[in-house]
Amino acid sequence: MQESGEMYLETILILSQKKDVRSIDVCEYMGYSKPSVSRAVGILKNGGYILVDRDGYITLTEEGKYVAERTYERHRVLTAFFESIGVSGDTASEDACKIEHVISDETFSALKKYIAENSDI
């Protein structure tokens, strides 16, 4: 899965926590054009990560939900860690968004363990 696919799945997860999601919602949230989102939705659908019903509502498959939750957890943990060491909220979130896609499972697990052991973070 490429970084862009993870971003779309994460966005669908976040939006679905508040309401039913359609492509237009993804466009508005991410600031992307309708054709770009339509192409991504097609790729994610063909890859088995999402389902789109006849009314255009998007839901995550089990695999899509796994990828989205994994990516979103990384985003939340990294953002909180960066803020705990004095990085501003906006910068912490922006940097977490970049790193969440490339950080190894080993490094992320070690970071989570470190945070758990140093509960003041």
Image (cartoon, rainbow, N blue to C red):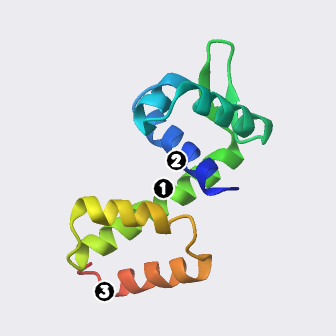
Query: Amino acid under label 1?
Result: Tyr
Please identify, in this view, whether the residue under mark 1 or under mark 3 is nearer the observer.
Answer: 1
Mark 2 sits on what residue?
10
Q: Position of residue 37 (x, y in %)?
A: 59, 32
The answer to whether any part of residue 112 appears in the image is yes
Query: Amino acid under label 3?
Result: Asn
| Crowding at mark 3 (Cα within 10 Å: few <14, some 14-19, many 20+) | few
SS at mark 1? helix
Sequence-wise, which precedes: disc 2 or disc 3?
2
Sequence-wise, which precedes: disc 1 or disc 3?
1
Mark 1 sits on what residue?
72
Q: Position of residue 68 (x, y in %)?
A: 57, 50
Query: Amino acid under label 2?
Result: Glu
The answer to whether any part of residue 22 appears in the image is no
> Residue at the location (60% across, 82% down)?
106
Q: Quadrant of the C terminus?
A: bottom left
Q: CA distance from mark 1 to mark 3?
A: 22 Å
The reply to whether the C-beta atoms of the residues labelled 1 and 2 are less than 8 Å apart is: yes
Q: CA distance from mark 2 to mark 3?
A: 28 Å
Q: Position of residue 108 (x, y in %)?
A: 52, 77
Please identify, in this view, whether the residue under mark 2 or under mark 3 is nearer the observer.
Answer: 2
Mark 3 sits on what residue?
118
Total residue callouts = 3
> Residue at the location (39% across, 32% down)?
18
* 7 left or right, relative to 15: right
Q: Quadrant of the N terminus?
A: bottom right
